[in-house]
Amino acid sequence: MNFKKITIIGIGLIGSSFALALKKQGFNGTITGVGRNEDNLIKAKEMGIVDEYSTSHAEGVTNADLILLASPVGHFEGIIKNIRDNIKKGAIVTDVGSVKAGVLKKIRPLIPEGVSFVGGHPIAGKECSGIYAATPDLFKNAKCIITPEENTNREALDKVIDIWKKTGAVTVIMSPEEHDLVFAAVSHLPHVVAYALVNSILDVDESILKHGGKGLKDMTRIALSPTELWRDICSYNREDILMTLRKFSSSITHMINLFEESDWDGLEKEFTRAKKARQGIEPD
């Protein structure tokens, strides 16, 4: 690995798992953790996740070869403003955020000359978060979307691709815009729908949610995701998510019409169409 010091800003599930995965693969440089909660950082060091830590963004990135932004995307702009004067020339900044184009508009002008930014988004996670949920195998065989722009430094891109492969991830290249459209449909929409589904059940009767079985738990697991994180994602990918929500609304309206018309054959056709499409997804 071509890095002597890696700084991870945001020591939660993803940031900690990234550190553990690299250590498992023999990374012998220094991993510095940066965050707001010093108790969490102390515990991360005790657990061997990081080698050193700081509650100061600027201090933590000093002399870092690679800086990983693993905090909610809404924090990225403020973080870059805090660290831009302390990032050394030749360093690479990357991230794990699940929205790209909107974030880039904010942070691109703030990246110092001589510093490369390469976007990344590992498609991995759990319903639980934090350092205690971290595992070195979180990214094994998971996709990691890398989102270079036309002027992205090729050497920096290759290094980011390589380090994600070291974690066990399978890298896929997309433009930031393609990424946001794709994940508005396959990730952002399902999260919004999961939150809405739980709220819909509460609106029927707040006492009945506890009777839900495994099917409901499977469908709504992602509603356990951090709400601040998903608020920021929705804010930055507003237009693409709105488009997918309108498609979903049209589909629900069509289902309602089939119910109102007692068109059970038509309803079965909709179920069959969805079932066939779902069968085409690789098993988890």
Image: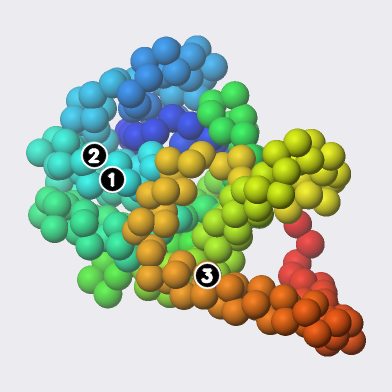
Q: Residue at x 55, y 45 (%)?
A: 167
Residue flagged by tag 2: what amino acid is it?
A: Ile
> Is 194 on the left-hand or right-hand side of 233?
right
Residue flagged by tag 3: what amino acid is it?
A: Leu
For label 3, the SS is helix
For label 1, the SS is helix
Badge 2 density bin: few <14, some 14–19, many ≥20, Cα 10 Å: some
Q: Residue at x 38, y 39 (%)?
A: 71
> Is 66 on the left-hand or right-hand side of 123?
left
Which quadrant of the view contains residue 197? Answer: bottom right
Q: Residue at x 78, y 49 (%)?
A: 216
State the separation of the CA atoms marked 3 and 2.
31 Å
Which quadrant of the view contains residue 81? Answer: top left
User: In the rendering, which numbered label is found on residue 245?
Assistant: 3
List the residue tagged with mark 2: 79
State the separation of the CA atoms marked 1 and 2.
5 Å
Residue 18 in view of the camera: no
Tag nearer the camera, 1 or 3: 3
Badge 1 density bin: few <14, some 14–19, many ≥20, Cα 10 Å: many
On-image quarter of the N terminus? top left
Residue flagged by tag 1: what amino acid is it?
A: Phe
Is there a contact, CB below 8 Å, between mark 1 and mark 2?
Answer: yes
On-image quarter of the C terminus? bottom right
> Is 201 on the left-hand or right-hand side of 31?
right
Residue 30 percent location from the top left of the image: 37, 27
Residue 44 in view of the camera: yes
Which quadrant of the view contains residue 101? Answer: bottom left
User: In the rendering, which numbered label is found on residue 76?
Assistant: 1
Badge 3 density bin: few <14, some 14–19, many ≥20, Cα 10 Å: some
For label 2, the SS is helix
Relative depth, front residue between 237 and 153: 237
Tag nearer the camera, 3 or 2: 3
